[in-house]
Amino acid sequence: MADRNTGKLPYPKAVGFIVTNEFCERFSYYGMRTILSLYLRDKLGYGDDNATVIYHVFTMFAYFFPLLGAMIADGWLGRFRTIFYLSLVYATGSVLISVAAMPPVQLPQLEFTIIALFLIAFGTGGIKPCVSAFGGDQFKLPEQERYLGYFFSLFYFAINAGSLISTFLTPILRADVHCFGENDCYSLAFGVPGVLMIVSIIFFVAGKRLYVTKTPTGNVLAKVSKCIGHAIVKSCKSKDKREHWLDRADDKFDTNLIEDIKALLRVLVLFIPLPVFWALFDQQGSRWTFQADRMEQDIGSWTLKADQMQVLNPLLILVFIPLFEVAIYPFLTWCKLIKKPLHKMIWGGILAAFAFVISGIVELQLLPTYGTPVAEGLAQLRLYNGQNCNYTLNFTLDNKTESFMIGPLGYYEKLDISAHDFVELPYSLRGERNSDCENSEFNGTFDLKENIANSFFVLNESLRGFEDNNDKAIDGVNIRFLSNVISPVSINIESNKGNKTKMALNSSNMSQIHLSKGTYNILVGDVEVLTGYSLKAGAVYTFNLYETNNGSYLINPIMITPANSVHILWLVPQYVVMTMGEVMFSVTGLEFSFTQAPATMKSVLTSVWLLTVAFGNLIVVLIVEGKFLDAQWKEFFLFAGLMMLDMFIFTSMAFRYKYVEYKSSTEELAVEEIKLPDKQIKET
């Protein structure tokens, strides 16, 4: 038996460079991905659905390219050169997305962002299967087996530390730093992860003279694919009976390889239902982030940003992994709810479904705060009274004449008018008798466009039409001034603290503007017309401004879309439940897969495991692009139901599976060396 006394060999110094490289790379990846969905929506102008699709397509590619990275490393360049070259590609993408986010540079933002995301996905995916294995190459086995365990623990800590810090920090850089005259700084939030990626390359190259580099041994995945392909072709051509269809490949491939592939396929069959879990899990960075962005985020004087909620996952992972091992698993085993490893995965999937049930319930509570967004088949009408008197509005709709009183500087809205392309709505508008408006009368037709918030502003002698935007405000408030003044005048919006001007515009400007939430004073010229008015996050306001004959001003703020009122901490339960599901599903799945696969097939299994994540993100893309449902809460419940159905299928497969125990010394050593996937949960 080999001597395993670790004291005879020093701990490889090269490991420090590899671990530091991994910390910086994970910081870069998770930092960029944390803010990506908000950037796609708020800066590139995508809607929630399209931003979700691009986010998940990017993630899909990031987990598809490990196949290519493994083939390049094993069959051509080796691990060191693969990591180095693809890290350069990765860094190029990281720098490019930061530069594209800088307004003064004036690059085609959309095109360069997509190119940058492709480069990042190719880089991070390509090096993913190589870094951990390259770290393992630095140890001499079996003499340094114990040191190898320490390395994997340190490697796992670096992954989670990079993820935890960047997920917390990049939203702060995004929202709290202002640059290039904007209320945020995405270029800095992308730039810091980009710099960390460059630093990771520097650290990786700095350790080159210390590394143990191994010659590529050939592409196992290619051999497996060729063997399976050859067996399928022979099965189609030959009718001779064989115990297993793969046996027909024995004329060209080694019998041991064929037997190992048979064992591999027995495990891979169980992988078929797994993508659905990842379809739910990866929505933490898309749908759940958008959900958080529509909630009240203040906790005392501190604001918990929507994308910062994602920090709960790596934080809870560090807590739950030891907790499950020492307490929860023994308890569930005692209750006879868990007997086999696959049973843990079943419960993990059920927990993921339950997390989406919770998110659906939260979404239902959020619906009243969304106001009434425009919808297909409907037109909206808003009429703002810009006069200091009452108006009576009469119109005929569906052969019914309706009459409404609109108060001074008030408004009227009807948000569910049936329309196909457009609808004509005859109306009359008459000022109240014995008032300044008694001679003011309007008759005509409102031409209302479908799927548009059609709005009109009543001036002294005319109606001014415009399109409203009553979509919920993101990261602040949206406001619009409708001014009925004798002559143009400046409007200043000042912070209530320090009287610092936050926004200045001309009274003729009717466009909607974005402003940070807070308490403000509003001045018309030098006259303060509104003092200490609180603009609440998520709300959309219209300010009706009127100048009297004696030169004084009247103003009436109207909230047309409600403010955020459901607190963001109501999302904590769904994050907790989802992370519990991740520990039971992902960690157990990796452990099960690697203990059940032959030693020669473990690298293939790693690649296919990562591929299930890619297919999970593809499921999200297909469902979102399919536009099957008209409300987000329905989509959440759909995913929950899909997950439960998936777990029903997986349960039937799991209870029929016959576990394999490998007895050879080769397999025992391989099992001892699979600590990395178990620890490397954040990689998947």
Image (spheres, rainbow, N blue to C red):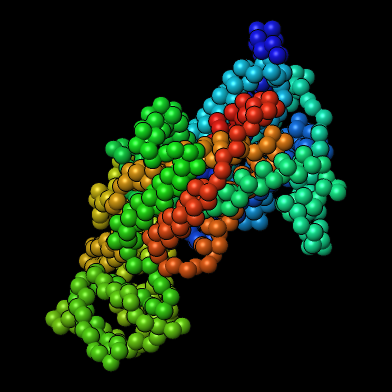
Which residue is at the far bottom? 399
**Quadrant hosting residue 392:** bottom left
User: Could you tell me residue 565's position as x and y percent?
Assistant: 28, 52
Relative side of 2 to 176, left or right: right
User: Could you tell me residue 517's position as x and y percent?
Assistant: 35, 49
User: Could you tell me residue 33's position as x and y percent?
Assistant: 55, 44
User: Could you tell me residue 484's position as x and y percent?
Assistant: 31, 69
Residue 656 in sight here:
yes
Relative side of 90 to 231, left or right: left
Which residue is at the far left? 434
**Quadrant hosting residue 599:** top right
Which residue is at the far top? 8
Q: Is residue 591 above or below residue 119?
A: above
Picture residue at 38% right of the left edge, 40% below the top: 337
Picture residue at 32% right of the left edge, 59% below the top: 364
Relative side of 89 to 640, left or right: right
Q: Nearer the viewer, residue 442 or 33?
A: 33
Relative side of 42 to 242, left or right: left
Picture residue at 27% right of the left edge, 63% below the top: 558
Residue 179 in sight here:
no
Which corner quadrant holds the C terminus? top right
Which corner quadrant holds the N terminus? top right
Picture residue at 83% right of the left edge, 45% below the top: 253
Circle count: 0
Q: Is residue 491 above or below residue 169?
A: below
**Quadrant hosting residue 146:** top right
Q: Nearer the viewer, residue 614 or 188?
A: 614
